[in-house]
Structure formats: structure tokens, C-alpha cells
Image (tube, rainbow, N blue to C red):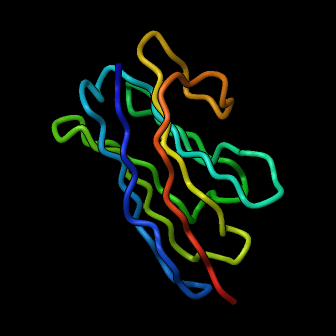
Amino acid sequence: QVQLVESGGGSVQAGGSLGLSCAVSRNAYRHCMGWFRQAPGKEREGVAGIGINGRQNYVDSVKGRFTISKDNAKNILYLQMNSLQPEDTAMYYCAAEPAPCLVSFGGLDYTYWGQGTQVTVSS
């Protein structure tokens, strides 16, 4: 069993930046991890993923603006978000899947989920 706890959400104006963190209870190095988001009235979407080997993947809408990273020694997953836009407003969730695993934007591919942290971007 792995527990995930997100932090770092908040409110920011368009063009601003926020950094999200996700504390992993143990063995982050043995998990593929991802960030997902869900806006009111919309389906959950994968935003960024990182594999055990550090390979990263991003949805097109955030490429060049968001960066996912993982500190295996500290068991923390990060998401640095720059040039935020109102359409980035959503609840953001981190997710983890133990090895063997693939970097994926499919929610069903992840077993463990955090409770979420709200990101609000005003125009």
C-alpha cells in the first residue's frame, strides 16, 4: 500500500507559476507516477507522467510549460507549472503505479491516488 499526499495548490493570475508536490509514503523509485487534473464538469485528464527510468511524457496542452520530476531519495513527486492559464484551473491529483509499469495518461493504469490539490488561475 502506498499513500500519496499532494500540496502546493493555490490561486494565481494568468501567466504566473505554481509548484505542486506529492509526498509518497515509500519506494517512489519503484513506481511510475503521474499528475492528473479534473475541472468541474469535465473528465479527468492526464497531464504529465514519469517512468521509473525518469522518462517524461506530457499532454500537448502543457508541453513547454509544465515539468514533472521525482526525487526518489525524498520520495516526492513534483510538478512545476509555468505560464499558467485559466484553462489550467482544476483539481490536480498525483497517482502511482508499482513496477512493472509504463508512463501512461490512462487513469485506470494507476492503482494509488492522492486526495488532490486545487489550482485556480484567474484572468
In the current view of this chain or complex, which residue is farthest to the front?
Answer: 115
Q: Quadrant of residue 83?
A: bottom right
- Name the residue nearer the viewer: 55 or 88: 88
Task: State which quarter of the image contains the C terminus.
Answer: bottom right
Q: Position of residue 74 (x, y in %)?
A: 18, 41
Residue 13 image point, x, y percent: 57, 88
Residue visible at 46% across and 9% down?
Answer: 100
Q: Residue at x 76, y 61 (%)?
A: 40
Residue 72 position, x and y percent, is: 23, 35
**What is the number of callouts on the image?**
0
Query: Is 85 left, or right, of 75 in this rendering?
Result: right
Does residue 90 lie above or below 42 as drawn?
below
Residue 70 appears in which quarter of the rendering? top left
- Tell me which residue sits at (42%, 13%) in the image: 99
Residue 105 falls in which quadrant of the image?
top right
Which of 29/7 is in front? 7
Answer with left or right where residue 114 lies relative to residue 27: right
In the rendered image, the residue lying farthest to the left is 73
Is 82 left, or right, of 71 in this rendering?
Answer: right
Is 6 above or below relative to 102? below
Image side of residue 58 versus residue 30, left or right: right
